[in-house]
Image (tube, rainbow, N blue to C red):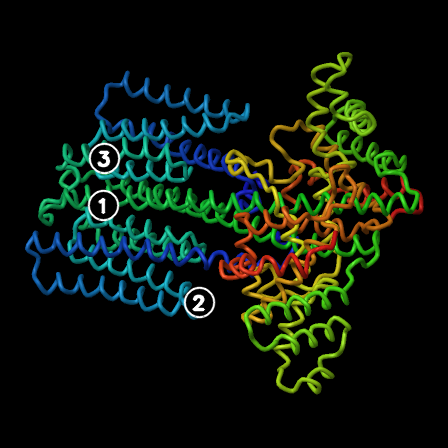
Amino acid sequence: MKDFFKRVFNTEFLPASEVRKIKVMLVMAFLLVITAVTIPFSIFLDYTLAVKITVIVVLFIVYGIIILLIKINKILPAIQITMLYSIGLTLFYTQGTSSFYAYLFFYISLTIIIFYQELYSYLVYGTILVVLGVFYTITHQDGLILLFDVSGSIYIYIVILVLFYIIFFIQILYTEKLYTDLNFEWVKMNKIIDKYQDDILYYLDEIRKEAKEVPLYEDTDFQKAADELSVFISEQFNENGKEITNVLDLYIYIHEKGLTKILENEEISVSMKKIANRLDKYLLNQRTEMFSMIINFYSKFRESEEYRDNRYDYSLNNLTKETDEQIIAMAMIYQYLSNEITGMDEWDQMKKVFSKEEIDALFSSSEIVDFFTPGQIGFFKDNYDLFIQYLSKKE
Amino acid sequence: MQRKKTYVFSEIEDYRELLEIKHLRTKNNFVLSIISLMMVISVLYMFLAEFPLKQTITILVGFLLVISSNIVELAYGREDSHFYKLNIYITTLGIFSLTIGMIFLFQSPSTITALFIAYAISAFYQDLKVLILSNLLLLFTVIMIMLHFPEFLDFQNATLENQFGVAFFFLSFITILTISSYIIVKQKRFFYNQIALSKETEFRNIDLLIDLRKQVMGETLNIEEYYKKTASFIDAFCIKIETENVFKEKLKILEALEKKTPVSVLIEQFPNYSKEDFFRLEALLISNHFKLRKVAIKISHILDLDIKKREIFSETHFKSFNHQSDNFEIKIIGFVLFYAALKKGSTAMPGLSEDKIYDILINTDYYYYIDPRIIKVYKDNSEVFDEIVKDAFGKKAN
């Protein structure tokens, strides 16, 4: 429980799938309280005893189904059912009484749906709730207005409910667009970082070969440490350490044979192949997730220049506003691109130098606007012959 | 004492703030439109319901005050982004004050629900401080009405059950609204954090790349040749546009800076240039870790970036040792390999000490990259982990 709350307070560190799980669990806790209160409240609702008992039993059964879905990690269906559950509760209250508190249920259910921030669910379930809410307001006026109320107060109820729905609709729409844009930028950044790390892996391997060291995965000390640590952790959960040692052996074996050969090997069981497939992202001889996390961890302990506002700014226009300096900088960048080794060639050797055509492609790509203004790109095109004649590598 | 979890790179805080402010302007515009719509609806209703003109004008002036303060702060926000921040607090206070004013004016339960609209508007900002402020205002108003103005909820069918129901479900609504807004605010932070984190990772990876390249290939950049070619290019360009070559002095300064000539010396040689000019020009050097080289390196890595739509919505880019699809054994293996690799190190990257590893794993975002059960075992037994590794590595371990 303590851990769960810790995770709730630190949701900003968790990916969407984890947050979704937390959301559904919080909604479950909330619905449990509401359902528990519904039992005594049902005494006052205008239903027969049989209906009341049936509804409450059904609510608990559905609640059990949601728990089951969470247990088997089917979060999306669980989310859908919690939304339907809250609508069901709303209907149970609103059809059983004409009190103001039943009207509040429309807001409670709408908030539960808003909580999930899923556009289509909000459009479907939210609209249903608003329509039901308007209908309820019109048909149960006596329970919602005072004896000497302001004129047209029923319309105030309706307008406020509809406005509430619209405001959150706009919010969800905006958030969806924002998350898509942010996600796109994040994915783009990760792809570029992957390319840097391809080069980093190559250089590290060269340094290792030069030092005549064995690769980490072949190092027996490393293997022994990993083996003993994994057995130690397994034992904390009263699990047999042998199983995890087998997985570790498989992990080392993938480095030797390669994943493709293991997947093609008919003698290896399907379950082992599945495990091998999942271990692939943690291999140490490729630019994998594991490699990336190690590099990023290490980079924390490397000296880095002091933070300045333009630390992440790679736009030439923000480096300098002086046109003459921008022209000099463009000349330098063009020379760098046409003369220097910029990555690995088709034979996986660190010998790739851009051709004229590739540099042209770079200057025509959509990403180039992150570095140069349209005016600067225009300058490059207008003086293309000079760039080629004076700055490109002589063949 | 439990330390607050932070991100592994403290540098990202400022950039995250920058991202938040960048999107705040759009949110402010949305809020302004909603408040204007509310003003039209409220005034129109009061006019049709034949409220006294004085009351209608009071409400109208209230709305106009909130709207004009919004416009003024948005205008100042262009110069100083703190005004955007100020605007969200003032608008929240303004819209709640207006709503409370309307509740007292109308004295109708229907108007009490307008508090939810005030909350919805402030929730648009997705800001933690605004969230606390609007929660306090909402809770305070609801409790105040229930305790001191129960006549506002004096329904025709008033029963004890009704009174309890209203109180209980009002509080339930506020609770779920608070939880919902809190998580949504945190969720938004996740994306800002990830982008900021990737920017810092990129910055440090380029630095590492430059150093490793130098170590493997030696310094391959022929700086003299760069300046010689640039000078020829500039000459030809000046001839082409038939103008005097005004670039010579800047090229001389840049070349001097490349040769690590101190700025104090350059100031004497080039009295027309200030310290700031030299500082700016330093970013345009192509050697070492200077910015222009980083720009060139980044450009050289952007070709053939293939981003598929499905990738945008998948979590494959979130690197961790706690993937939902992995079983417990794989999660353990992932973590121990990571830990042992950090301890072991290599020629280029020496192994890290236990203190350093523990600090990052327990006190930063890395804590959440690992299965909670596994990180708990590590947290409780970090000395045992250290001993196991020392034992396996012999004396070589850090």
Q: Secondary structure at mark 2?
A: helix
Image position, residue A346 (x, y; %): 73, 37
Give the number of the disc on residue A160.
1
Mark 1 vs mark 3, CA separation in Å? 11 Å
Taking depth in this image into account, of A382 and B206 the one nearest to the observer is: A382
Q: Are marks 1 and 3 on the same chain?
A: yes
Which residue has dot 2 on it?
A: B82
Give the number of the disc on residue A230.
none
Q: Along the horizontal axis of the image, is B108 left or right of B373?
A: left
Looking at the rendered structure, the kind of residue marked 3 is Gly
Vertical position of residue A373 compared to residue A347: above or below: below
Which residue has dot 3 on it?
A: A133
Residue at mark 3: chain? A
Residue at mark 2: chain? B
User: Dot 2, crowdedness within 10 Å: few (<14), some or many (≥20)?
Assistant: few
Q: Along the horizontal axis of the image, is A128 left or right of B229?
A: left
Identity of the residue drawn at 20% across and 44% down:
A159
Identity of the residue drawn at 27% across and 61% down:
B97
**Which of marks 3 and 1 precedes in the sequence?**
3
Image position, residue A218 (x, y; %): 87, 34
Q: Secondary structure at mark 3?
A: helix
Looking at the rendered structure, the kind of residue marked 2 is His
Vertical position of residue A132 compared to residue A318: above or below: above
Taking depth in this image into account, of B142 and A342 the one nearest to the observer is: A342
Vertical position of residue B247 compared to residue B94: above or below: below
Disc 3 and disc 2 in contact, CB within 8 angstroms: no
Mark 1 vs mark 2, CA separation in Å? 32 Å
Mark 3 vs mark 2, CA separation in Å? 40 Å
The quadrant of the image that shows the N terminus of chain A is: top right
Q: Is residue A241 visible?
A: no
Among all residues in the image, which is located at the extreme left?
B50
